[in-house]
Amino acid sequence: MMPEKRSGKPGLEERYQVVHPSEPRLRIDISACLPARSPLADCTACADACPASVLTGTAQGPQLNGDCLGCGRCAARCPTDALRVRGFPDLPLPDEASPRIREVDCWRVPESESRADTLRVPCTGGLDATQMLSLNRMAGGEGVTVLDRGWCTGCPACGNEGHPAHEAIREAGSILDEAGIPRHRHPRISTEPLPVRVAAKTIPEGKLESRVSRRGFLRRLGGEAISARAQLTGSTTPTVSSPLVEKIRPRRRLRLYEELTALTGQGHTPATLPRFSVSETCQGHGICAALCPTGALRHQGDHGTRTLFLEATLCIACRLCEQSCPEQAIRVEASVGGEANTELHRLTELRCRDCGRVFTTGNDSEERCHPCRKSRHLMNAELGSVPRIESTTGEGSR
Amino acid sequence: MAKWGMVIDLDKCTGCQACTTACSMENNTLPGESWQDVLFYHEGEYPSAQMKWLPRPCMQCEKPSCVYVCPTRATYKDEEAGGIVFVDWNKCIGCKYCMIACPYGVRFYADEQPLVEPDIRDVYPGENGQMWSPPYQNPEQDWRRGIGIQPKGVVSKCTFCHHKVSKAPDGVADLDEDDPDLVEYVPACVRTCPPKARFFGDLDNPESNVNRLIGDKHGVRLLDHTGNRPQVYYLGAGAGIPAFSPRKS
């Protein structure tokens, strides 16, 4: 998984385009935005998270109508990492050398007030639980401290639910609790008030990422070189893979499992995996797998069977499969209690005696496909008691 | 931008299927998978039964029901391209919802067992994920608009020969195959029609021949009660357009 992740970097940066030309900080990878991919998706996570209420979710992805604060709370909430806000660094992976970070401070605090070993981000609310876990690991033994300078609750980027980082810290805390990490090693908020007059009025805009790690810089450079080389060699021929529709890599979720592995030695637990059920009405159309944005559902056919697999570690619980199933056979039972790799449903492939098409069925003694059975039923109902309908056709017709 | 429309005069149509063949050649469709075909049917009862036929391209509806049901927005109506309904083969997942939604049955998914052996897909096996690779291939290829040899697992449909029509000069009222300057831009079925039963032009241009024909000869649209508002009109007093008669239950 990890080598692929690194070589997968080229092209990733270019995918992100500004949401609105007036706002260079907020960028989106539209191919990863769920409502832009499918009209069945009703995700409005970014719009709901925006404290300034300037984002609206539309069929073309989020639209910016108003002044963005650049706080990054939308990006932290996006289930597919489609949004990015400038100023939030790529934190190193558990197996990479990482600088020591003890505290997290926001850009409104003057740089002179932050101590060494401080990660400065536009707003601490733009960090999600996974990033909190990464920071906690980078803090070493005693857990990372998110600083509250006393003006957070009055800040426009705060919204109205206390400190902006509160939610992410609570989530990270519950994950750490389950992993058996004592409370004093959890991330926490610490109040170290500063007078409001030293604060920048808004989150500074033109500021470049001051603390990009050297590794992150080199990695990005390497990515650009690789993509430039790809352009030179002219690899523009349409590479066809099945399915044609590109899947999103749920980077945040995979990152969470990496952090969990670093913590406990065991990546996923039933508490982090959703549980699915597939009823007998499944006809094996495979629409759920074709629509699944991350490729968590996989529909495979070989040796006369068609099987629906679930790789729950990739599932982001968007419920597109539920909504798209014409038989309403698949259901996300719960967001917890699942297994990593399950075979959800297996169907046998048979050839219809009437129309000759390959069809799937759970019943091996079935001879005709669903449409042919249906038209037979109709014909029998129409013609009443004509017994020969069942007996004459089929044999020797093909 | 023009709004392309087609007029088919059923009084002139002889049911020769030249349009079907021309379309298949132009678009490299599989044998039997005709984006444009002619339906033959009976009307009336003996002794006054009649045999009738109806050429049927995609209607390029103004309100296409196929577009509303697509779960990936693969099928879309491109107003910039004259209101043609396209399938983006890069997005299509082959769920066939659009085929069920289409009231005219003019969308195709080639998964059928062929009626005659051998399977042409095995004779000319496809490359690069294409369904097949016939000896003659139209070089036009635009997967974003569903033009070219179709890949496996996608739905395909008539594109009003967008690869030809789009090259026509701006502001042209009609694409007439008798005009040597325009003949290369005329859709294959219109260009080939031996009795000249098909006309192609701009429905937004009040001066166009198609608008004049629709007005003078009372052009009608198929299944108008569905509200799909096709951009294909049928003319014909004698031949007649199949009437919609609600099923008696």
Image: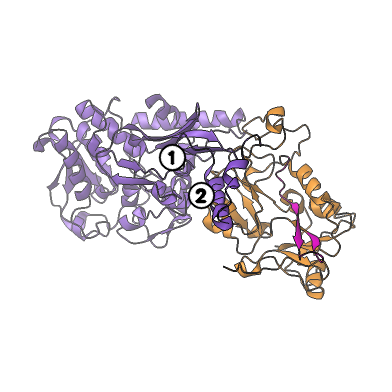
Mark 1 burial class by Cα count in 10 Å: few <14, some 14-19, many 20+:
some
Chain shown purple: that is A
Answer with the quarter of the image where residue B83 lies: bottom right
Specify the amino acid type for callout 2: Thr
Element type at marker 1? loop
Compare residues A151 and B195 and report the one nearer the observer. B195
Query: Quick one: which chain is orange?
Result: B
Is residue A125 found left or right of A176 in the rendered image? right
Per the image, is B45 magenta?
yes
**Span colored in magenta:** B31-52
Give residue B135's position: percent from left, percent from top: 77, 31
Label 2 CA crowd tier, 10 Å (few <14, some 14–19, many 20+): many
Query: Alpha carbon of mark 2 to alpha carbon of mark 1: how far?
Result: 14 Å
Tell me the residue that label 2 is attached to. B72
Question: Where B214 falls versus A280 (above or below)?
Answer: below
- Residue A148 falls left or right of residue B64: left
Which residue is pictured at 71% across the width and 39% down the height?
B30
Q: Using the image, determine if residue A91 lies above or below residue B211.
A: above
Task: Kindly state the secondary structure of the residue where label 2 is placed.
Answer: loop
Question: In the drawing, what numbered circle is on residue A248?
Answer: 1
Quadrant housing residue B116? top right
The x, y position of residue B200, in whole percent, is 79, 60
The chain holding disc 2 is B
Report if residue A291 lies within the magenta region: no
What residue is at 78 percent from the left and 71 percent from the top? B214
Proximity of marks 2 and 1: CB atoms separated by less than 8 Å: no
- Residue A285 x %, y %: 49, 42
Please give left or right for residue A254 compared with residue B22 in the image: left
